[in-house]
Image (cartoon, grey):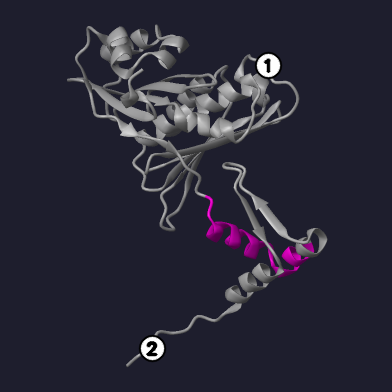
């Protein structure tokens, strides 16, 4: 396997058409997620598909901040949460209870589950969120529904994951394309011959040749991806201030310390009595106007 295909996103276009595509392979970044939590195989593979999907989708949306994909329901898998940043960093987690079997997505996440996509542009700008009910058998098909209903973009996805690698391919018609497009239908039919095994094992060049060797395809240089969590002491302290001094003091008196664990990366943040007093004393300090000379 080519190292240039590990943990990277490949963009490609079909020359002289309104069709674009992306391929993603996640290796070390995916295994970094799995090192932080042991998931049953069915949950693991679903989370891997979600992580590959958010990597693909973040590249289709021009953002400086982050894109979050979430599936929440009342099934055995109650939560899938993954996000990607404009800097090419990824993270993800899943919550589940009991045994989770392979099968239709609705059976895994519940009949009334919803998929949401949240775009955070950063710098205090307004966030955007779109929702769609989970009415299809796979995560890929549910995301295609989302793009058709919320973005009015024809989009197809192919996703796969195992214990070592997660991968995905996306095809999308550019905005403003003609209503009927034989080229789009042709590329989708070719894409539908792709197997999960091929998606995980073939390099980008091998995969594109396997599917589209008769097409005029231009493959761009890969863009690196990596696992990284955005948790930080500043974020944790902001959260604690939001709870309020009295509630935080109650936790401190009951447990002898205040401990906060990041679910994404398992980093533990611990605060003792001195830390808590410093934290809230700093929050109460009035702003000092700049000195004028």
Which numbered disc covers residue 160? none
Residue 83 lies, in percent from the top left, at 49, 39
Q: Position of residue 9 (x, y in %)?
A: 35, 29
Residue drawn 31% across and 8% down? 210
Q: Is residue 9 left or right of residue 101?
A: left
Q: Is residue 19 visible?
A: yes
Which residue is labeled 2 in the image? Answer: 291
How many other residues sit within 10 Å of disc 2, few (<14), some (14-19) or many (≥20)?
Answer: few
Earlier in the chain: of badge 1 and badge 2, it is 1
Image quarter for residue 109?
top right
Residue at horizontal 62 percent and vertical 20 percent from the top = 41
**Front in this rendered view, residue 3 or 116:** 3
Is 159 one of the magenta-colored residues? no
Give the structural element (helix, strand or loop) at label 1: loop
Image coordinates for residue 7, horizontal then vertical, percent: 39, 29
- Say whether residue 137 is left or right of residue 60: right
User: Which residue occupies the extreme right position in the image?
Assistant: 254
- Which span is picked out in magenta? 231-250
* Magenta portion: prevailing SS class: helix
284 to 257, vertically: above or below: below
Of 142 and 4, nearer the camera is: 4
Q: Which residue is mark 1?
A: 101
Q: Does any portion of residue 172 appear in the rendered image? A: no
Q: Quadrant of residue 195?
A: top left
């Amino acid at each position: 396997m080519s190292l240039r295909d590990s943990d990277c996103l490949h963009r490609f276009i079909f020359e002289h058409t309104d069709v674009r595509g992306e391929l993603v392979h996640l290796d070390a970044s995916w295994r970094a997620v799995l090192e932080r939590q042991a998931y049953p195989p069915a949950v693991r593979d679903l989370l891997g598909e979600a992580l590959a999907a958010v990597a693909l989708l973040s590249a289709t949306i021009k953002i400086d901040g982050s894109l979050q994909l979430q599936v929440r329901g009342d099934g055995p898998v109650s939560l899938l949460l993954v996000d990607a940043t404009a800097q090419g960093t990824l993270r993800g987690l899943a919550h589940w209870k009991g045994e989770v079997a392979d099968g239709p997505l609705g059976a895994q996440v519940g009949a009334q589950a919803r998929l949401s996509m949240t775009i955070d542009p950063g710098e205090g700008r307004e966030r955007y969120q779109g929702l769609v009910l989970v009415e299809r058998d796979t995560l890929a098909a549910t995301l295609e529904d989302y793009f058709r209903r919320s973005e009015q973009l024809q989009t197809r996805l192919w996703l796969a994951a195992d214990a070592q690698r997660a991968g995905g391919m996306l095809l999308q018609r550019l905005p403003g394309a003609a209503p009927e497009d034989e080229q789009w239908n042709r590329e989708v039919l070719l894409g539908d011959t792709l197997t999960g095994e091929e998606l995980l094992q073939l390099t980008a060049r091998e995969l594109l040749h396997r599917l589209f060797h008769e097409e005029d395809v231009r493959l761009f240089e890969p863009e690196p991806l990596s696992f990284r969590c955005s948790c930080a002491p500043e974020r944790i302290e902001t959260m604690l201030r939001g709870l309020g001094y009295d509630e935080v003091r109650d936790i401190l008196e009951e447990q002898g310390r205040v401990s906060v664990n990041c679910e994404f990366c398992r980093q533990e943040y611990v605060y003792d009595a001195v830390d808590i007093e410093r934290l809230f004393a700093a929050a109460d300090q009035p702003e000092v106007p700049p000195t004028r000379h």
